[in-house]
């Protein structure tokens, strides 16, 4: 999975009834570990909260790296390739047409041919 960006959001109570939402995000290089970089962002948010003297913090969930469009497309292609019935495969047809990406068309048509010998998308 290619991840090129990480993000983290925190929500902090700064006064009774008043909350502050902070967002940190940034690009990462392929050499950087997405989980480590995301946890660094989480730590920055918590440090900022201490500086502002917040009353209460909504716990920051374990932050997950943000997927790139390419990694989502790769995931969809893998899901298409794992279909075992035509009915399951045909549920992907609208998505394949909507995304209009060659790798999805190829995965769909190859799987369709494997399952019934034809390919009738769009």
Image (cartoon, rainbow, N blue to C red):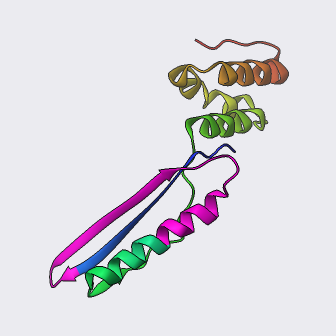
Image coordinates for residue 27, horizontal then vertical, percent: 52, 48
Image coordinates for residue 24, horizontal then vertical, percent: 41, 60
Residue at image x 56%, y 69%?
39
- Could you tell whether 100 is left or right of 54 in the image? right
Give 61 or 49, whichever is nearer the viewer. 49
- Could you tell whether 58 is left or right of 29 in the image? left
Give 36 or 119, whichever is nearer the viewer. 36
Image coordinates for residue 78, horizontal then vertical, percent: 73, 37
Q: Is residue 35 magenta?
A: yes
The boundaries of the magenta stretch are: 14-42
Quarter holding residue 76: top right
Q: Is residue 40 magenta?
A: yes
Quarter holding residue 4: top right
Image coordinates for residue 68, horizontal then vertical, percent: 57, 41
Residue at image x 37%, y 69%?
10
- Could you tell whether 90 is left or right of 38 in the image? right
Location of the C terminus by quadrant is top right
Quarter holding residue 35: bottom right
Total number of numbered labels?
A: 0
Give 120 or 12, whichever is nearer the viewer. 12
Give 57 or 34, whichever is nearer the viewer. 34
**Vertical relation: 61 (above or below) 85:** below
Location of the N terminus by quadrant is top right
Residue at image x 40%, y 78%?
47
**Vertical relation: 113 (above or below) 60:** above
């Amino acid at each position: 999975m290619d991840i090129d960006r990480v993000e983290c959001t925190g929500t902090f109570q700064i006064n009774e009834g008043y909350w502050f939402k902070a967002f940190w995000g940034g690009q990462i290089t392929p050499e950087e570990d997405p989980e480590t970089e995301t946890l660094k962002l989480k730590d920055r948010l918590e440090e900022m909260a201490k500086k502002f003297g917040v009353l209460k913090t909504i716990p920051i969930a374990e932050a997950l790296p943000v997927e790139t469009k390419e990694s989502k497309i790769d995931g969809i292609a893998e899901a298409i390739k794992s279909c075992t019935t035509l009915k399951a495969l045909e549920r992907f047809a609208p998505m394949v047409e909507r995304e209009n990406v060659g790798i999805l068309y190829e995965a769909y048509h190859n799987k369709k041919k494997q399952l019934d010998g034809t390919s009738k998308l769009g």
